[in-house]
Image (cartoon, grey):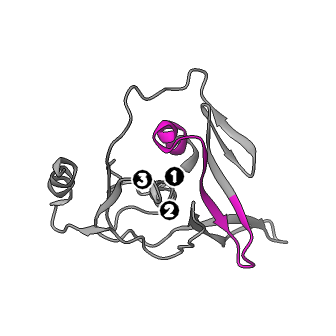
Amino acid sequence: MDLSNDTGGNMWPMLLGLGPIFGDGIVGYFASHNNSFIGWGYSKGSVFCNKNEVMKLKTPYKLKNKIEKLAVIISNNTCSSGEATAVSFIGIKNSCFIGEPTYGNSTANRSFKLSNGAMIYLTVCKFADRNKKTYGVPINPDIVALNGTSKKTAIEWLNKK
């Protein structure tokens, strides 16, 4: 899985497309300053947040084969919802993060309307993995690969027995 140039956008379509790889259940959290956690995840062709369906596929994809090993390529271009997607892979058995630390914008924002009609966007929480480890900082790779060697390193790791 190459997230090295996933600079963000909307996390929900990304999670929906990757859901069959994650499997059913909570794959990450929004963690607030007071240690409350709101889960996000995948189940039977839909993604959810706090048990509320966000998006659903008419015909969900089902994996034909079990994934034995999973290499997730990250870089300092992996940012924002790209980092939410990366966080969702943390804790998957036989997975390995390869590349460089992510950008470090592993947080969620919320808009607030000001009295003059202007809007302000503030960071309101950090991302947390399925084990509730919080981020808000760069996500570090398991194997560092610099100068464009991440894909080659990932292939080598995948081919190791």
Q: Amino acid at mark 3?
A: Lys
The reply, left or right, for residue 160 in relation to residue 42 is left
Measuring from the top left, give residue 119's x and y in whole percent.
Answer: 72, 66
**Chain-order first, disc 2 or disc 3:** 2
Q: Which residues are magenta?
A: 14-38
Q: Disc 3 on helix, strand or loop?
A: loop
- In this picture, is 153 found above or below 127? above
Residue 63 included in the magenta stretch of the image: no
Residue type at mark 1 is Gly
Residue beneath disc 1: 9
Mark found first going from the N terminus, 1 or 2: 1
Q: Which mark is nearer the camera, 2 or 3?
A: 3
Mark 2 residue element: loop
Distance in Å between CA atoms under marks 3 and 1: 27 Å
Residue 144 appears in which quarter of the rendering? bottom left
Q: Residue at x 68, y 44 (%)?
A: 48
Q: Residue at x 56, y 21 (%)?
A: 59
Identify the disc placed on residue 56: none
The residues bearing labels 1 and 2 have C-alpha atoms spaced at a distance of: 7 Å
Q: In the rendering, at what x and y percent does residue 139 appear?
A: 42, 70
Residue occupying the far front of the picture? 161
SS at circle 1:
loop
Query: For residue 93, which numbered disc appears in the image?
Result: 3
Circle 1/circle 2 CB separation < 8 Å: yes
